[in-house]
Image: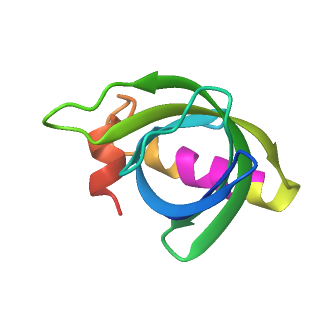
Amino acid sequence: MWITSLWVKTGLLRRGMGRSRNVSEGGLFLETHRALKEGEEVLITLGLKDDMVRLRGRVVRQAQPTDEYLHCAGVKFTHMNKDDRETLKDYIGALKTPATTEKPTAMDISNSL
């Protein structure tokens, strides 16, 4: 799932793009080209096939970059309007309803787009 826009509010507003490695109704694990700091507020627009979901979140965890991943951060959602919340909930629900009863992995989510 691609993050079409990412705004970081720290007195200085930065814009960038990223990719979610995993997503739930409460937050996501975000991969970016720039490091994000714990406590930073982020404004995110998620591209979900034909829909766009706008939300606000706070960085609650930071992971060190590796050869496989760029900068990664755990983001907890702090605000999302009702329509966007329903769109995200429906999208996540659709990912959980394949023929098997197994929960989708981050790879399943990435490959479904």
Between 80 and 25, the one lying in front of the other is 80
Q: Is 59 left, or right, of 73 in this rendering?
A: right
Residue 71 at x, y = what percent?
35, 39
What is the quadrant of residue 59 in the picture? top right
Between 13 and 85, the one lying in front of the other is 13
Between 10 and 96, the one lying in front of the other is 10
Q: Against 73, is 108 above or below?
A: below
Q: Residue drawn 82% across and 61% down?
A: 83
Which residue appears farthest toward the right when viewing the image? Answer: 82
Residue 56 at x, y = what percent?
74, 48
Point out the stretch of residues depicted in magenta.
Answer: 85-93
Q: Is residue 41 located in the magenta-colored stretch of the structure?
A: no
Residue 99 at x, y = what percent?
33, 43
Q: Is 1 left, or right, of 44 in this rendering?
A: left
Which residue appears farthest toward the left when viewing the image? Answer: 67
Residue 96 at x, y = what percent?
46, 40
Between 57 and 52, the one lying in front of the other is 57
Res 81 visible: yes
Q: Residue drawn 37% across and 45% down?
A: 98
Colouring: rainbow
Q: Residue drawn 38% across and 30% down?
A: 101
**Where, quadrant-wise, is the N terminus in this rendering?**
bottom left
Q: Residue drawn 53% across and 37% down?
A: 28
Q: Main secondary structure of the magenta part?
A: helix
What is the quadrant of residue 41 in the picture? top right
